[in-house]
Amino acid sequence: MSSELLRNLKPSETLGSIAKVNKLKEKGINVISFGAGEPDFPTPKPIKEEAEKALNNDFTKYTPTSGIIELRDAICQKLLKDNKIEYKPSNIVVSNGAKHSLFNICYAICPAGGEILIQKPYWVSYPDMIYAAGGVPVNVVSSSSKTFKVSATDLEKKRTDKTVAFIINSPNNPTSEVYSKDELKDIAEWALKNNVWIISDEIYEKIVFNGHEHYSIPYLCPDMKDKTFVVNGMSKAYSMTGWRIGYAAGPEDIIKKIVLFQSHTTSCPNSIAQKAAVKALDGEAKDVEGMVTAFERRKEIIFKGINEIKGLKANKPEGAFYILVDCSEILKGREISDFCNFLLDNVHILVISGNAFGIENHVRLSFATSDENIIEGLKRLAKGVELWINSL
């Protein structure tokens, strides 16, 4: 018998597909995956060398729950330099990945039954982490026909006396859209007026294209600094997904509560990974720039290729490394999950159903894979769409 808090949790819709992929690979079948939520590049060499140094120096014991002071100092310097926001180490808590940071925040600020607004489509874990924290996720859909980004007007339509916070993710997974300076200002002013927390998930911050820029709300609206949590981490920008280092910056009184909570759940983050994260933030890992350049090139390949396939539509990604594809024209009343399974079974490519992100009739493709895989995968996708249409 499960806890009431865990009763609403749902398994990831991708698990079954991944299991099928593994079975196909065991049979020697070449499967091209567009499912990856992580860069396909190795962690930069200087970062790995710093981890090796920490290991050789026996830096293998517990650290302070909130993270070592060197890392929290480095995070403060990063936030000042990149985001133009001034914090002290006491405003920072380092956790086991940005996902852990987000969950800690939900748990710290959300009363039982409190409502947290999320943009739909959403990253798969937002609803479940809100449920697990005792809250209620409330989906907000854009009123625009051109974008999935929500406005202050959209948020106000969903606000109630139980509204606690709004989670904003820019650049966005799964839409790859980037909120503009003016859009963020409007949202910040709405939140300030209505005493609503902003939880700003900025994990894809450094991966932006086409002249788009990333902005943090506390910089654009300083009055919101004490009502905003800035969440980031090492995973996407530095290709350190498995190192599990994320962090939250926020008001000191709530950060103290999060540190206390974390001390009773996971304790400190990995000691060696913390030392490596300090190195990542010192700016010497130039591989990051090359990685973003590669993603920009791949973005053009996949955007062009998808829009050349009759029946598929997609907007050009503005950031992150995903493209959300509208398949409604070819479904003819059938389920998007059926289409995903058809592609895997018949042309051996994995795409992620939009159902996982709360959006029907769409699939998400990650271009965090090689140019060669993208080109071959697009050929298979075109063939798969043709086979699918002929099977209807």
Image (spheres, rainbow, N blue to C red):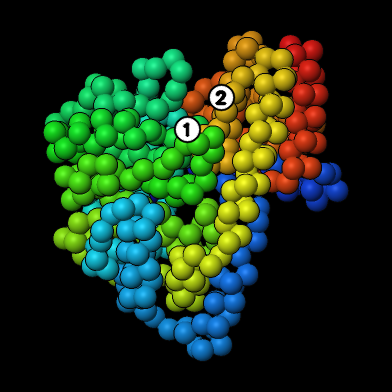
Q: Position of residue 382 (x, y in %)?
A: 77, 24
* Residue type, mark 2 in image: Asn
Label pair 2/1, CB-CB below 8 angstroms: yes
Q: Please tell me in which quadrant of the rendered image residue 197 appears.
A: top left
For disc 2, the marked residue is 315
Question: Residue 282's x, y, as percent?
Answer: 46, 68
Q: CA distance from mark 2 to mark 1?
A: 9 Å
Label 2 crowd (10 A; few <14 / some 14-19 / many >=20): some
Question: Residue at position x 44%, y 22% from top?
Answer: 147
Q: Position of residue 335 (x, y in %)?
A: 60, 20
- Above or below, comparing residue 98 to residue 390 in the picture: below
Q: Image check: 87 left or right of 6?
A: left
Q: Of residues 167 and 334, which is closer to you in this image?
A: 167
Tell me the quarter of the image containing the C terminus.
Answer: top right
Q: Is residue 294 visible?
A: yes
Residue at the bottom extreme, as displayed: 57
Instruction: Please state which of residues 266 and 67 is positioned toward the viewer in this rendering.
Output: 67
Quickly name the residue at label 1.
177
Residue at left offset 39%, top offset 54%: 82
Image height of 176 relative to 247, above or below: above
Q: Position of residue 111 (x, y in %)?
A: 19, 45
Say whether disc 2 or disc 1 marks the residue closer to the N-terminus: 1
Q: Quadrant of residue 87?
A: bottom left
Mark 2 secondary-structure assignment: loop
Is 191 located above or below residue 265 in the figure? above
Q: Amino acid at mark 1?
A: Glu
